[in-house]
Image: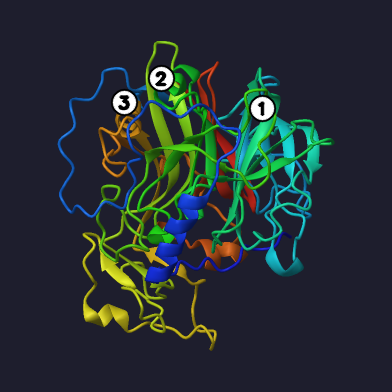
Amino acid sequence: MGICRQDREGLVRPKPHWIACLALVTGLLACTLGQPTPLPVGPDAGATSQSESQPEPLPPLSTDVVSPADMEYLGAFRLPGGDEPPLTFAYGGNAMTYNPDNNSLFITGHDRVAYGGVPDGDQVAEVSIPAPVISKNLEDLNMGEFLQNFANVTAGRFTELEEIPKVGLQYLNRPETGPKIHIAWGQHLQPQDVASHGWFNPTLSNPDFQGTWFIGNQDLYSVNGYMFEIPREWADAYTGGRVLATGRMRDGGQGGMGPTLFAYLPWNADGSPPPAGTRLEEVTLLLYENAYNTEEIVRSLNGYQHPDSWEGGAWITTVSGKGAVLFAGTKSNGEKYWYGYIHPDGPQLACVDNHVTDFPTCRMADGSNCPQADFAGCCDAEAGTCVSSRGWWTTRFDAQFLLYDPADLARVAAGELEAWQPQPYAVIDIDEHLFLNPPEWDLAEVGWGDQRRNRIGDVTFDRVNGLLYVLELYADGAKPVVHVWRIY
Protein backbone atom coordinates (compact mmCIF):
# COMPACT_ATOMS: atom_id res chain seq x y z
CA MET A 1 0.00 0.00 0.00
CA GLY A 2 1.27 3.49 -0.82
CA ILE A 3 1.52 6.47 1.49
CA CYS A 4 -1.35 8.93 1.40
CA ARG A 5 -0.78 12.57 0.49
CA GLN A 6 -0.55 14.97 3.39
CA ASP A 7 -2.98 17.68 4.54
CA ARG A 8 -3.26 20.31 1.78
CA GLU A 9 -3.44 23.61 3.61
CA GLY A 10 -4.49 26.65 1.64
CA LEU A 11 -4.09 29.58 4.00
CA VAL A 12 -4.31 33.01 2.40
CA ARG A 13 -2.49 35.58 4.47
CA PRO A 14 -1.60 39.11 3.38
CA LYS A 15 2.09 39.90 3.00
CA PRO A 16 3.47 42.53 5.36
CA HIS A 17 4.37 45.75 3.53
CA TRP A 18 8.08 45.32 4.26
CA ILE A 19 8.11 41.96 2.40
CA ALA A 20 6.61 43.56 -0.68
CA CYS A 21 9.23 46.33 -0.54
CA LEU A 22 12.04 43.82 -0.09
CA ALA A 23 10.79 41.81 -3.07
CA LEU A 24 10.85 44.95 -5.20
CA VAL A 25 14.39 45.85 -4.19
CA THR A 26 15.53 42.27 -4.79
CA GLY A 27 14.00 42.34 -8.25
CA LEU A 28 15.78 45.57 -9.14
CA LEU A 29 19.12 44.21 -8.03
CA ALA A 30 18.80 40.76 -9.63
CA CYS A 31 21.00 40.05 -12.64
CA THR A 32 20.14 37.85 -15.60
CA LEU A 33 22.88 35.84 -17.28
CA GLY A 34 23.14 34.17 -20.63
CA GLN A 35 19.68 35.04 -21.95
CA PRO A 36 18.26 35.88 -25.38
CA THR A 37 18.32 39.38 -26.78
CA PRO A 38 15.77 41.66 -25.02
CA LEU A 39 12.38 41.42 -26.63
CA PRO A 40 10.76 43.98 -28.92
CA VAL A 41 7.51 43.71 -26.94
CA GLY A 42 5.53 45.93 -24.61
CA PRO A 43 5.90 46.14 -20.83
CA ASP A 44 5.19 43.14 -18.66
CA ALA A 45 1.48 43.17 -17.96
CA GLY A 46 1.35 41.85 -14.43
CA ALA A 47 -1.76 41.14 -12.38
CA THR A 48 -1.17 43.79 -9.72
CA SER A 49 -2.81 46.72 -11.48
CA GLN A 50 -4.79 48.87 -9.07
CA SER A 51 -7.51 49.46 -11.63
CA GLU A 52 -10.83 47.91 -10.61
CA SER A 53 -12.39 48.51 -14.03
CA GLN A 54 -13.71 45.60 -16.06
CA PRO A 55 -11.71 44.44 -19.10
CA GLU A 56 -12.43 46.15 -22.40
CA PRO A 57 -14.47 43.95 -24.76
CA LEU A 58 -12.19 41.79 -26.85
CA PRO A 59 -12.48 41.64 -30.64
CA PRO A 60 -14.33 38.68 -32.20
CA LEU A 61 -12.58 35.37 -31.71
CA SER A 62 -10.31 34.28 -34.50
CA THR A 63 -11.68 31.49 -36.67
CA ASP A 64 -8.61 29.32 -36.27
CA VAL A 65 -9.07 28.21 -32.66
CA VAL A 66 -9.65 24.60 -31.68
CA SER A 67 -13.31 24.07 -30.81
CA PRO A 68 -14.74 21.42 -28.44
CA ALA A 69 -16.13 19.69 -31.54
CA ASP A 70 -12.53 19.19 -32.72
CA MET A 71 -11.78 16.95 -29.72
CA GLU A 72 -12.64 13.24 -29.82
CA TYR A 73 -12.30 11.00 -26.76
CA LEU A 74 -10.40 7.79 -27.64
CA GLY A 75 -10.33 6.00 -24.28
CA ALA A 76 -7.75 5.25 -21.59
CA PHE A 77 -4.91 2.92 -20.65
CA ARG A 78 -3.28 1.74 -17.43
CA LEU A 79 0.26 2.20 -16.14
CA PRO A 80 2.60 -0.70 -15.27
CA GLY A 81 4.32 -1.64 -12.02
CA GLY A 82 3.42 -2.49 -8.47
CA ASP A 83 2.53 -0.47 -5.40
CA GLU A 84 5.77 -0.35 -3.40
CA PRO A 85 7.11 3.20 -2.95
CA PRO A 86 9.05 4.91 -4.33
CA LEU A 87 9.16 2.66 -7.44
CA THR A 88 5.47 2.89 -8.24
CA PHE A 89 2.98 5.18 -9.95
CA ALA A 90 0.69 4.85 -6.91
CA TYR A 91 0.29 8.31 -5.36
CA GLY A 92 2.23 9.62 -8.35
CA GLY A 93 1.37 11.20 -11.66
CA ASN A 94 2.49 14.63 -10.50
CA ALA A 95 3.99 15.34 -13.95
CA MET A 96 4.01 13.85 -17.45
CA THR A 97 5.55 14.71 -20.82
CA TYR A 98 5.39 13.17 -24.29
CA ASN A 99 8.59 12.01 -26.02
CA PRO A 100 8.14 12.41 -29.81
CA ASP A 101 11.49 10.76 -30.50
CA ASN A 102 10.31 7.48 -28.97
CA ASN A 103 6.50 7.80 -29.01
CA SER A 104 6.45 7.37 -25.23
CA LEU A 105 5.60 9.13 -21.99
CA PHE A 106 7.82 10.18 -19.08
CA ILE A 107 5.76 10.17 -15.86
CA THR A 108 6.68 10.79 -12.21
CA GLY A 109 6.04 8.13 -9.61
CA HIS A 110 5.08 8.20 -5.93
CA ASP A 111 5.49 11.73 -4.58
CA ARG A 112 8.17 12.59 -2.09
CA VAL A 113 6.84 12.71 1.45
CA ALA A 114 8.41 15.17 3.85
CA TYR A 115 10.05 14.15 7.12
CA GLY A 116 11.56 10.96 5.71
CA GLY A 117 8.46 9.01 4.63
CA VAL A 118 9.51 8.72 0.96
CA PRO A 119 12.62 10.92 0.69
CA ASP A 120 13.42 9.71 -2.83
CA GLY A 121 9.95 10.06 -4.32
CA ASP A 122 8.90 11.67 -7.63
CA GLN A 123 11.22 9.42 -9.57
CA VAL A 124 10.76 9.42 -13.34
CA ALA A 125 10.00 6.44 -15.60
CA GLU A 126 9.43 6.12 -19.35
CA VAL A 127 6.47 4.02 -20.52
CA SER A 128 5.10 2.88 -23.86
CA ILE A 129 1.73 4.02 -25.15
CA PRO A 130 -0.73 1.19 -25.87
CA ALA A 131 -3.98 1.61 -27.79
CA PRO A 132 -6.56 3.40 -25.60
CA VAL A 133 -9.85 1.62 -24.87
CA ILE A 134 -13.24 3.14 -24.10
CA SER A 135 -14.56 1.22 -21.09
CA LYS A 136 -15.62 1.83 -17.49
CA ASN A 137 -14.05 -1.51 -16.56
CA LEU A 138 -10.37 -1.09 -15.69
CA GLU A 139 -9.69 -4.70 -16.60
CA ASP A 140 -10.61 -3.93 -20.20
CA LEU A 141 -7.85 -1.34 -20.56
CA ASN A 142 -4.49 -2.05 -22.15
CA MET A 143 -1.39 -1.43 -20.04
CA GLY A 144 1.77 0.41 -20.98
CA GLU A 145 5.19 -1.14 -20.50
CA PHE A 146 8.33 0.23 -18.92
CA LEU A 147 10.87 1.47 -21.47
CA GLN A 148 13.04 2.91 -18.69
CA ASN A 149 12.31 2.02 -15.10
CA PHE A 150 12.10 4.57 -12.30
CA ALA A 151 15.20 6.69 -11.73
CA ASN A 152 15.86 9.32 -9.09
CA VAL A 153 16.88 12.02 -11.60
CA THR A 154 16.63 14.80 -8.99
CA ALA A 155 18.72 13.06 -6.31
CA GLY A 156 20.17 15.74 -4.05
CA ARG A 157 18.04 18.46 -5.69
CA PHE A 158 15.00 20.33 -4.40
CA THR A 159 15.66 18.98 -0.91
CA GLU A 160 14.13 22.16 0.54
CA LEU A 161 10.87 21.47 -1.40
CA GLU A 162 9.55 18.13 -0.18
CA GLU A 163 6.24 19.08 1.48
CA ILE A 164 3.62 17.94 -1.08
CA PRO A 165 5.75 18.57 -4.19
CA LYS A 166 4.45 20.25 -7.35
CA VAL A 167 6.26 19.11 -10.50
CA GLY A 168 6.16 19.90 -14.21
CA LEU A 169 8.02 18.17 -17.08
CA GLN A 170 8.56 18.98 -20.78
CA TYR A 171 10.61 16.97 -23.26
CA LEU A 172 12.30 19.22 -25.83
CA ASN A 173 14.84 18.26 -28.50
CA ARG A 174 16.51 21.43 -29.78
CA PRO A 175 19.58 21.81 -32.03
CA GLU A 176 21.23 23.97 -29.34
CA THR A 177 20.92 21.44 -26.51
CA GLY A 178 19.92 18.08 -27.95
CA PRO A 179 17.14 16.17 -26.18
CA LYS A 180 16.43 17.36 -22.65
CA ILE A 181 13.60 17.01 -20.16
CA HIS A 182 12.91 20.37 -18.56
CA ILE A 183 11.57 20.35 -15.02
CA ALA A 184 9.79 22.72 -12.64
CA TRP A 185 9.62 21.86 -8.95
CA GLY A 186 7.79 23.52 -6.09
CA GLN A 187 5.91 22.56 -2.97
CA HIS A 188 2.50 23.21 -1.46
CA LEU A 189 3.58 25.91 1.02
CA GLN A 190 6.16 27.59 -1.18
CA PRO A 191 9.31 29.44 -0.04
CA GLN A 192 10.32 32.27 -2.32
CA ASP A 193 14.11 31.89 -2.15
CA VAL A 194 14.58 28.41 -3.67
CA ALA A 195 15.19 28.13 -7.42
CA SER A 196 12.60 25.99 -9.15
CA HIS A 197 13.63 25.04 -12.72
CA GLY A 198 16.26 22.82 -14.37
CA TRP A 199 16.78 20.13 -16.99
CA PHE A 200 18.09 16.55 -17.24
CA ASN A 201 18.89 13.97 -19.92
CA PRO A 202 16.15 11.59 -21.11
CA THR A 203 18.61 8.73 -20.58
CA LEU A 204 17.46 8.28 -17.00
CA SER A 205 20.54 6.32 -15.91
CA ASN A 206 22.66 9.39 -16.75
CA PRO A 207 20.46 12.42 -16.00
CA ASP A 208 23.29 14.99 -15.68
CA PHE A 209 20.92 17.44 -13.99
CA GLN A 210 21.52 21.15 -14.74
CA GLY A 211 20.11 24.14 -12.88
CA THR A 212 18.45 25.33 -10.76
CA TRP A 213 17.04 28.64 -11.99
CA PHE A 214 14.40 31.19 -11.13
CA ILE A 215 11.78 32.54 -13.55
CA GLY A 216 12.60 36.24 -13.35
CA ASN A 217 11.33 37.69 -10.10
CA GLN A 218 7.95 36.00 -10.33
CA ASP A 219 6.15 34.62 -7.29
CA LEU A 220 7.15 30.96 -7.09
CA TYR A 221 3.51 30.08 -6.40
CA SER A 222 2.92 31.14 -10.04
CA VAL A 223 5.62 29.26 -11.96
CA ASN A 224 6.38 25.70 -10.86
CA GLY A 225 3.35 23.46 -11.33
CA TYR A 226 3.21 22.58 -15.05
CA MET A 227 5.20 23.05 -18.27
CA PHE A 228 4.62 22.75 -22.01
CA GLU A 229 6.10 23.68 -25.37
CA ILE A 230 5.11 26.84 -27.26
CA PRO A 231 5.03 26.35 -31.07
CA ARG A 232 8.28 27.73 -32.46
CA GLU A 233 6.73 30.11 -34.98
CA TRP A 234 4.49 31.67 -32.32
CA ALA A 235 7.40 31.96 -29.88
CA ASP A 236 9.58 33.62 -32.51
CA ALA A 237 6.84 36.15 -33.21
CA TYR A 238 5.74 37.02 -29.67
CA THR A 239 8.22 35.87 -27.00
CA GLY A 240 11.61 36.38 -28.62
CA GLY A 241 12.02 32.66 -29.25
CA ARG A 242 11.18 31.56 -25.72
CA VAL A 243 9.60 28.18 -26.46
CA LEU A 244 9.03 26.84 -22.95
CA ALA A 245 5.88 27.76 -21.03
CA THR A 246 5.65 27.33 -17.29
CA GLY A 247 3.03 28.18 -14.69
CA ARG A 248 1.12 27.06 -11.65
CA MET A 249 -2.32 27.53 -10.15
CA ARG A 250 -3.05 26.12 -6.73
CA ASP A 251 -6.08 26.39 -4.50
CA GLY A 252 -6.42 29.45 -2.31
CA GLY A 253 -5.46 31.98 -5.00
CA GLN A 254 -1.80 32.07 -3.99
CA GLY A 255 0.04 32.71 -7.21
CA GLY A 256 -3.06 33.88 -9.07
CA MET A 257 -6.85 33.47 -9.18
CA GLY A 258 -6.69 31.36 -12.31
CA PRO A 259 -4.05 29.59 -14.39
CA THR A 260 -0.77 31.41 -14.98
CA LEU A 261 1.69 31.27 -17.87
CA PHE A 262 5.21 32.55 -18.55
CA ALA A 263 7.51 31.95 -21.53
CA TYR A 264 11.22 31.39 -20.88
CA LEU A 265 14.38 29.91 -22.42
CA PRO A 266 16.94 28.12 -20.21
CA TRP A 267 20.03 27.94 -22.41
CA ASN A 268 22.73 30.24 -23.75
CA ALA A 269 23.33 30.82 -27.47
CA ASP A 270 25.78 27.91 -27.57
CA GLY A 271 23.30 25.58 -25.84
CA SER A 272 25.07 25.60 -22.49
CA PRO A 273 23.01 25.96 -19.30
CA PRO A 274 23.05 29.25 -17.36
CA PRO A 275 24.76 29.21 -13.97
CA ALA A 276 22.72 27.88 -11.06
CA GLY A 277 20.69 30.61 -9.42
CA THR A 278 20.22 32.64 -12.63
CA ARG A 279 16.98 34.59 -12.92
CA LEU A 280 15.87 33.74 -16.43
CA GLU A 281 14.14 36.48 -18.41
CA GLU A 282 10.47 35.69 -18.87
CA VAL A 283 7.55 36.99 -20.91
CA THR A 284 4.24 37.06 -19.04
CA LEU A 285 1.36 35.57 -21.02
CA LEU A 286 -1.31 35.05 -18.34
CA LEU A 287 -1.42 36.15 -14.70
CA TYR A 288 -4.50 36.86 -12.61
CA GLU A 289 -4.69 38.74 -9.33
CA ASN A 290 -3.01 37.17 -6.32
CA ALA A 291 -4.98 36.47 -3.14
CA TYR A 292 -2.02 37.75 -1.13
CA ASN A 293 -2.76 41.22 -2.53
CA THR A 294 -6.50 41.35 -1.88
CA GLU A 295 -9.29 39.36 -0.24
CA GLU A 296 -11.65 40.38 -3.04
CA ILE A 297 -12.28 38.15 -6.04
CA VAL A 298 -11.17 40.62 -8.73
CA ARG A 299 -9.07 40.47 -11.91
CA SER A 300 -9.63 36.72 -11.88
CA LEU A 301 -10.69 33.84 -14.08
CA ASN A 302 -14.43 34.13 -14.75
CA GLY A 303 -16.23 32.02 -12.16
CA TYR A 304 -13.08 31.62 -10.07
CA GLN A 305 -13.44 29.97 -6.65
CA HIS A 306 -10.66 29.30 -4.12
CA PRO A 307 -10.86 25.46 -4.33
CA ASP A 308 -9.97 25.61 -8.07
CA SER A 309 -6.82 23.69 -9.01
CA TRP A 310 -5.35 23.68 -12.53
CA GLU A 311 -2.74 20.93 -12.66
CA GLY A 312 -1.70 20.74 -16.32
CA GLY A 313 -1.47 22.61 -19.59
CA ALA A 314 -0.71 22.11 -23.27
CA TRP A 315 -0.48 24.26 -26.38
CA ILE A 316 -2.57 22.23 -28.81
CA THR A 317 -2.41 22.67 -32.58
CA THR A 318 -3.84 20.94 -35.67
CA VAL A 319 -2.51 20.29 -39.16
CA SER A 320 -5.17 22.66 -40.48
CA GLY A 321 -3.64 25.54 -38.50
CA LYS A 322 -6.01 25.70 -35.52
CA GLY A 323 -4.61 26.28 -32.06
CA ALA A 324 -5.54 26.73 -28.40
CA VAL A 325 -3.88 26.94 -25.02
CA LEU A 326 -5.47 24.28 -22.84
CA PHE A 327 -5.47 24.04 -19.05
CA ALA A 328 -6.79 20.97 -17.23
CA GLY A 329 -7.84 20.67 -13.63
CA THR A 330 -10.49 20.32 -10.98
CA LYS A 331 -12.91 23.26 -10.96
CA SER A 332 -15.06 24.32 -8.01
CA ASN A 333 -18.56 25.08 -9.29
CA GLY A 334 -20.33 25.09 -5.95
CA GLU A 335 -23.07 27.36 -4.68
CA LYS A 336 -20.65 27.99 -1.81
CA TYR A 337 -17.08 27.06 -0.95
CA TRP A 338 -15.08 27.11 2.27
CA TYR A 339 -11.77 26.41 4.02
CA GLY A 340 -12.22 23.56 6.44
CA TYR A 341 -13.75 20.11 6.10
CA ILE A 342 -16.51 18.10 4.42
CA HIS A 343 -19.76 18.35 6.38
CA PRO A 344 -20.95 14.87 7.44
CA ASP A 345 -24.59 15.80 6.76
CA GLY A 346 -24.18 16.49 3.06
CA PRO A 347 -22.37 18.53 0.38
CA GLN A 348 -24.84 21.41 0.57
CA LEU A 349 -23.55 22.30 4.06
CA ALA A 350 -20.34 24.19 4.83
CA CYS A 351 -17.95 23.12 7.57
CA VAL A 352 -15.30 25.79 8.09
CA ASP A 353 -12.22 25.59 10.26
CA ASN A 354 -13.48 28.07 12.85
CA HIS A 355 -9.98 28.48 14.30
CA VAL A 356 -8.97 30.39 11.15
CA THR A 357 -10.15 34.00 11.35
CA ASP A 358 -7.64 36.05 9.33
CA PHE A 359 -9.45 35.69 5.97
CA PRO A 360 -13.02 34.84 4.88
CA THR A 361 -13.29 31.07 5.19
CA CYS A 362 -16.66 30.69 3.46
CA ARG A 363 -17.94 32.38 0.29
CA MET A 364 -20.90 32.14 -1.99
CA ALA A 365 -20.42 31.44 -5.71
CA ASP A 366 -20.45 35.19 -6.47
CA GLY A 367 -17.55 35.80 -4.06
CA SER A 368 -19.61 37.33 -1.27
CA ASN A 369 -19.32 36.00 2.27
CA CYS A 370 -21.53 33.10 3.36
CA PRO A 371 -24.31 33.70 5.91
CA GLN A 372 -22.95 34.02 9.42
CA ALA A 373 -24.34 30.64 10.45
CA ASP A 374 -21.95 28.94 8.01
CA PHE A 375 -18.93 30.13 10.01
CA ALA A 376 -19.79 28.04 13.09
CA GLY A 377 -17.87 24.93 12.03
CA CYS A 378 -19.05 21.35 12.46
CA CYS A 379 -16.16 19.33 13.91
CA ASP A 380 -13.02 19.38 16.02
CA ALA A 381 -9.93 18.09 14.23
CA GLU A 382 -7.97 17.65 17.47
CA ALA A 383 -10.77 15.50 18.86
CA GLY A 384 -10.87 13.46 15.68
CA THR A 385 -14.49 14.28 14.81
CA CYS A 386 -13.84 15.60 11.25
CA VAL A 387 -14.69 13.27 8.37
CA SER A 388 -12.15 14.72 5.92
CA SER A 389 -8.75 16.35 5.71
CA ARG A 390 -8.58 20.12 6.05
CA GLY A 391 -8.44 22.24 2.93
CA TRP A 392 -10.58 24.09 0.41
CA TRP A 393 -13.91 22.35 -0.21
CA THR A 394 -17.01 23.19 -2.23
CA THR A 395 -20.51 21.89 -2.78
CA ARG A 396 -19.43 20.66 -6.24
CA PHE A 397 -16.22 19.89 -8.13
CA ASP A 398 -15.91 19.13 -11.86
CA ALA A 399 -13.00 18.01 -14.05
CA GLN A 400 -12.61 20.53 -16.85
CA PHE A 401 -10.54 21.78 -19.76
CA LEU A 402 -10.20 25.53 -20.37
CA LEU A 403 -9.41 26.70 -23.91
CA TYR A 404 -7.73 30.09 -24.47
CA ASP A 405 -7.22 31.88 -27.79
CA PRO A 406 -3.45 32.25 -28.43
CA ALA A 407 -4.19 35.63 -30.03
CA ASP A 408 -5.22 36.95 -26.59
CA LEU A 409 -1.91 35.82 -25.09
CA ALA A 410 -0.05 37.48 -27.97
CA ARG A 411 -1.80 40.74 -27.07
CA VAL A 412 -0.64 40.32 -23.44
CA ALA A 413 2.95 39.76 -24.62
CA ALA A 414 2.71 42.91 -26.73
CA GLY A 415 1.34 44.99 -23.86
CA GLU A 416 -2.06 45.44 -25.52
CA LEU A 417 -3.92 43.53 -22.79
CA GLU A 418 -3.38 43.27 -19.06
CA ALA A 419 -2.25 39.77 -18.09
CA TRP A 420 -5.50 39.21 -16.15
CA GLN A 421 -7.80 40.10 -19.03
CA PRO A 422 -7.80 36.96 -21.24
CA GLN A 423 -10.63 34.53 -20.52
CA PRO A 424 -11.36 31.04 -21.88
CA TYR A 425 -13.46 30.95 -25.05
CA ALA A 426 -14.62 27.39 -24.19
CA VAL A 427 -14.97 25.24 -21.07
CA ILE A 428 -15.24 21.45 -21.46
CA ASP A 429 -16.46 19.13 -18.68
CA ILE A 430 -14.81 15.70 -18.92
CA ASP A 431 -16.28 13.93 -15.87
CA GLU A 432 -18.26 11.52 -18.06
CA HIS A 433 -15.01 9.87 -19.13
CA LEU A 434 -13.46 9.49 -15.67
CA PHE A 435 -13.48 6.51 -13.30
CA LEU A 436 -13.64 8.62 -10.11
CA ASN A 437 -12.96 5.58 -7.95
CA PRO A 438 -10.24 6.36 -5.38
CA PRO A 439 -9.22 3.83 -2.72
CA GLU A 440 -11.54 3.89 0.28
CA TRP A 441 -8.71 4.87 2.63
CA ASP A 442 -8.03 8.02 0.57
CA LEU A 443 -11.57 9.40 0.69
CA ALA A 444 -10.80 11.62 3.68
CA GLU A 445 -8.16 13.36 1.55
CA VAL A 446 -9.75 13.49 -1.91
CA GLY A 447 -13.46 13.53 -0.99
CA TRP A 448 -16.33 11.70 -2.65
CA GLY A 449 -19.35 12.27 -4.86
CA ASP A 450 -19.80 15.89 -5.92
CA GLN A 451 -17.06 16.80 -3.44
CA ARG A 452 -14.38 14.61 -5.02
CA ARG A 453 -11.34 16.86 -5.60
CA ASN A 454 -7.95 16.04 -7.21
CA ARG A 455 -9.77 14.56 -10.21
CA ILE A 456 -7.14 15.05 -12.90
CA GLY A 457 -3.45 15.83 -12.96
CA ASP A 458 -0.97 16.75 -15.66
CA VAL A 459 -1.51 16.68 -19.43
CA THR A 460 0.83 16.50 -22.43
CA PHE A 461 0.41 16.81 -26.20
CA ASP A 462 1.70 14.82 -29.18
CA ARG A 463 1.80 17.58 -31.79
CA VAL A 464 2.62 15.29 -34.74
CA ASN A 465 -0.31 12.94 -34.23
CA GLY A 466 -2.68 15.39 -32.54
CA LEU A 467 -3.09 13.35 -29.34
CA LEU A 468 -3.73 14.83 -25.90
CA TYR A 469 -2.81 12.67 -22.90
CA VAL A 470 -4.48 13.39 -19.53
CA LEU A 471 -3.75 11.80 -16.15
CA GLU A 472 -6.71 10.91 -13.96
CA LEU A 473 -5.46 10.63 -10.38
CA TYR A 474 -6.54 7.82 -8.01
CA ALA A 475 -8.26 5.94 -10.86
CA ASP A 476 -6.60 2.50 -10.74
CA GLY A 477 -6.42 2.06 -7.00
CA ALA A 478 -3.96 4.76 -5.97
CA LYS A 479 -2.40 4.78 -9.46
CA PRO A 480 -3.35 7.20 -12.22
CA VAL A 481 -4.88 6.21 -15.54
CA VAL A 482 -4.00 7.96 -18.82
CA HIS A 483 -6.93 9.24 -20.92
CA VAL A 484 -6.47 10.14 -24.59
CA TRP A 485 -8.19 12.67 -26.88
CA ARG A 486 -7.55 13.22 -30.58
CA ILE A 487 -7.50 16.86 -31.74
CA TYR A 488 -8.69 17.39 -35.35
Q: Give the residue at x 35% y 32%.
A: 413
What residue did someone put label 1 on? Answer: 129
SS for callout 1: loop
- Structural crowding at the residue carrying mark 3, measured as other residues with C-alpha within 10 Å and reported as few (<14), some (14–19) or many (≥20): some
Q: Position of residue 225 (x, y in %)?
A: 53, 47
Relative to residue 290, is residue 215 drawn left or right?
A: right
Q: Give the residue at x 54% y 87%.
A: 382
Q: Is residue 317 above or below residue 205?
A: above
In this rendering, the label closer to the viewer, 3 or 1? 3
Q: Position of residue 381 (x, y in %)?
A: 51, 83
What residue did someone put label 3 on? Answer: 407
Q: Real-space Cα distance between discs 2 and 1?
A: 34 Å
Q: Real-space Cα distance between discs 3 and 1?
A: 33 Å
Q: Is residue 458 above or below residue 375?
A: above
Q: Real-space Cα distance between discs 3 and 2?
A: 11 Å
Relative to residue 311, is residue 117 drawn left or right?
A: right
Q: Amino acid at mark 2?
A: Ala
What residue did someone put label 2 on? Answer: 237
Q: Is residue 210 above or below residue 323?
A: below
